[in-house]
């Protein structure tokens, strides 16, 4: 019996040691986490960013997002707000851009209690289609559905503060599954809305912003990361077969 009790004590100590927060890890409890706001992403050169996000002075609203600036794929998204009822986002292209609009050149998001309920998409001021955003009782986004003649869209399944699966609205096939969450903060966690970028067919994953996760995902241990003193991810990277570190994306914040 004494040997059994000693064994249980050793296992309990080992589990406690595994849960001990490391430097830069946000404790998994109800403690207040410092709020930071993503303002820039880049690959290797901070002077050649992939995305620039401009906020208002109080970081309550996004005013402008520019993707792939100073490249042939540059697109600017300018935000205009109409009180607390709606916002309009207009896409624009610089002269050096070879981008073309895919699906829409502007959209209007209708708001209720700070959340998007419907988005109307326009191409050169001509209405194209609308999408309905639905939420669960906790205020988590659970679907974005195009309510056209043939409804389609995406459904999100949640595990706590993180989406763990996305599925097609019809026929319901799984698009992605997300596992291996840690206590580090996802860079887009404090972005206000899930928004599409209008150029999926040309470049990117289709999202302008996607605050669908509070916590960073390690992608099965494939994607490593570094964090700052508040637990926000500042760098994602890979390690090749030779053990070399391959930086992927740097994340810059303001607060």
Image: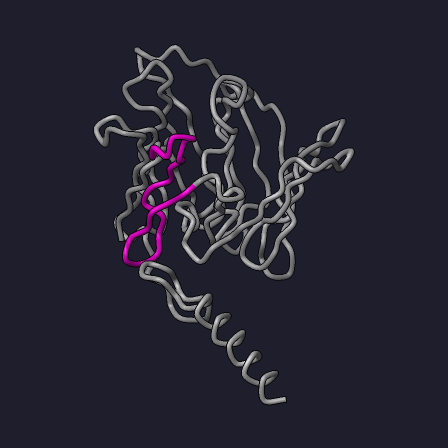
Most distant residue in the right direction: 171
Q: Nearer the viewer, residue 150 or 25?
A: 25
Residue appearing at x 71%, y 29% in the figure: 148
Label count reads 0
Instruction: Name the side, left or right, on which 170 lies relative to 118.
Output: right
In this picture, is 33 found above or below 148? below
Q: Nearer the viewer, residue 1 or 175?
A: 1
State the residue at coordinates (23%, 32%).
46
- Tell whether position 231 is magenta: yes
**Is residue 22 rendered magenta in the image?**
no
Q: Is residue 74 above or below residue 88?
A: above
User: Horizontal placement of 72 versus 197: left or right?
Assistant: left
At horizontal 71% and vertical 32% (from top left) the residue drawn is 152
Quarter location, residue 166: top right
At a point 57% along the width and 32% down the height, the residue shown is 120
Q: Which color scheme did the rendering employ for the protein?
A: one colour
User: In the figure, residue 208 lies in which quadrant?
Assistant: top left
Q: Please state which of residues 27 and 223 is positioned toward the viewer in this rendering.
A: 223
On-image quarter of the N terminus: bottom right
Q: Position of residue 153 (x, y in %)?
A: 67, 34
Left or right of 33, for residue 173 = right
Span colored in magenta: 224-245
Residue 26 screen position, x and y as percent: 39, 62
Q: Residue furthest left?
A: 47
Camera-side residue of 227 and 241: 241
Pinpoint residue 80: horizontal percent, then vertical percent: 39, 37
């Amino acid at each position: 019996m004494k040997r059994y009790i000693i064994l249980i004590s050793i296992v309990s100590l080992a589990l406690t040691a595994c849960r001990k927060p490391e430097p830069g890890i946000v404790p998994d409890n109800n403690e207040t986490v410092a709020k930071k706001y993503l303002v820039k992403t880049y690959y290797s050169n901070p002077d050649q960013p992939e995305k620039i996000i401009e906020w208002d002075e109080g970081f309550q609203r996004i005013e402008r997002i520019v993707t792939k600036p100073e490249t042939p794929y540059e697109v600017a998204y300018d935000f205009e707000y109409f009180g607390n009822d709606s916002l309009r986002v207009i896409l624009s292209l610089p002269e050096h851009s070879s981008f073309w609009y895919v699906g829409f050149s502007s959209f209007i998001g209708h708001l209720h209690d700070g959340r998007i309920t419907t988005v109307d998409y326009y191409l050169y001021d001509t209405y194209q289609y609308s999408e309905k955003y639905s939420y669960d009782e906790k205020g988590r986004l659970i679907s974005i559905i195009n309510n056209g003649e043939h409804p389609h869209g995406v459904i999100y399944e949640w595990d706590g503060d993180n989406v763990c699966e996305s599925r097609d609205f019809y026929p319901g096939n799984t698009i992605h599954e997300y596992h291996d969450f840690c206590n580090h903060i996802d860079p887009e966690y404090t972005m206000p809305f899930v928004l599409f970028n209008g150029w999926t067919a040309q470049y990117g994953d289709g999202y302008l912003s996607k605050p669908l996760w509070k916590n960073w995902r390690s992608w099965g241990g494939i994607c490593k990361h570094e964090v700052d003193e508040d637990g926000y991810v500042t760098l994602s990277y890979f390690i090749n077969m030779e053990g070399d570190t391959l930086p992927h994306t740097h994340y810059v914040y303001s607060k």
